[in-house]
Amino acid sequence: MNVSSKFAICGLPIRVDTYKTCSFGCKYCFSNYRKIMEFDKQLQVGNIKSVERKLDKIFNKGEVKPENFLDVLISEGYDWHCGGMSDPFQPAEKKFQITKQLLDVTNKYGMHILFSTKSDITYDCDIRPDLHTFQLSVTNVDNRTDVEPNVPSIEDRYKFYKSLKERGFKVGIRIQPFIPKISTLDIVDKFKDADHFTIEGLKLVPQNKEHKEYLLELTGLKSSDFTQMGLLNLKPEIRLELYKPFIKKLQENNISYSIADNDLHQLGTSKCCCGDALIHKSTDFNNTAMLYKYGIDYTKEQVDSEILKCDVDCCKCNQLFTSNRQEGCVTVQDFYDKRFDRKSSPFSPKFLYTNQK
């Protein structure tokens, strides 16, 4: 469990992954190809005891360190995101029950958790519609086992989706990654009663030739179609054209949606790119929330005001960044002070792509 370094652009910066490695083996997974969550490596499981100790200190002993970013966010009741890097309901859960152990702890404290998954089952986990919501990751409805070799069939995942809805859970669909030629409007047609849709573009790992060449051949794209933003992202003008039919269809069907690409957060209907319908409480200082409240020309003074309201201005966050990216900054406020006017930084509204025709 930690705070994401993407807190400037993510409304749910509390991240928890119950497993390190993922057995679904999706061919496009940048976590796997960056050697972060390799599906063919030995399984590692999360340390739930550390989560239990953290919650006990905060809620039973009242030990909240005002400079500790994670302490403050948890104590203020912000939602957690589980499954950002590795699926919490992958087949390993049947044996190890780490996600179950997490919920056995967090449910006692009333923690709200958004789960991201490709699974069709939650095993023996004590999931509750008053505390838990779901984002089902769907890249296609054609059972492309060449791309997602170990993912349950779309038929089984649709049954799981309907079962969750019938039991009162809020469920969103996340088209992540959006894969040209594979991600089609049929996804919207199939899940048209979803509580929210999120779209996020395909990313290539520039250092991994195998990953890059496979996805270029799969999609018919060229290297020149991508621009480097850490990972290789499709150029924003290309992504916009690909997304337009989806946005049009979502709007026609009055379905809330978000574009989760960091440079396109101004497109959407929610203050959190995971979808307000799925969220109990998200931060107000992330750029999607700022865009939602103040518009695309929001100011540094407005950001500072929201940071102060959330009591995170003095929280230390330099440890979330590699030493060459800290630039002498220590606190949340330091990073905004340093980077707000920098066009190349997601801390700045200037980072957004606005050359729309």
Image (spheres, helix red, strand yellow):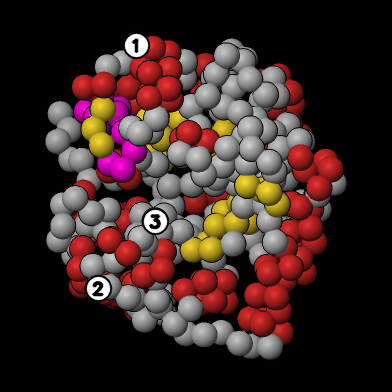
* Span shown in magenta: 229-240
Tell me whether the residue at label 1 lies in contact with that at label 2, contact meaning CB atoms closer than 8 angstroms: no
Tell me how far mark 3 sits from mark 2, CA to CA: 18 Å
As for residue 16 lying within the magenta part, the answer is no
Whole-number angstrom distance, CA of label 1 to CA of label 2? 43 Å
Q: Earlier in the sequence, mark 1 or mark 2?
A: 1
Location of the N terminus by quadrant is bottom right
Label 3–label 2 contact, CB within 8 A: no
Q: From the top left corner, tell me how far across and down residue 199 is, in percent.
A: 43, 34
Residue 286 shows in the view: no
Task: Please name the residue that numbered disc 3 is placed on.
Answer: 6
Q: Residue 328 carries which label?
A: 2
- Residue drawn at x 36%, y 81% is 314
- Label 3 Cα crowd, 10 Å radius (few <14 / some 14-19 / many 20+): some
Which of the two labelled residues, at mark 1 and mark 3, occupies the earlier sequence position? 3
The part of the image, by quadrant, that contains residue 322 is bottom left
Q: What amino acid type should be assigned to the residue bearing mark 2?
A: Gly
Q: Earlier in the sequence, mark 3 or mark 2?
A: 3
Can residue 156 be seen by looking at this rendering? yes
Compared with 141, 36 (above or below) is: below
Q: Which amino acid does label 1 sit on?
A: Gly
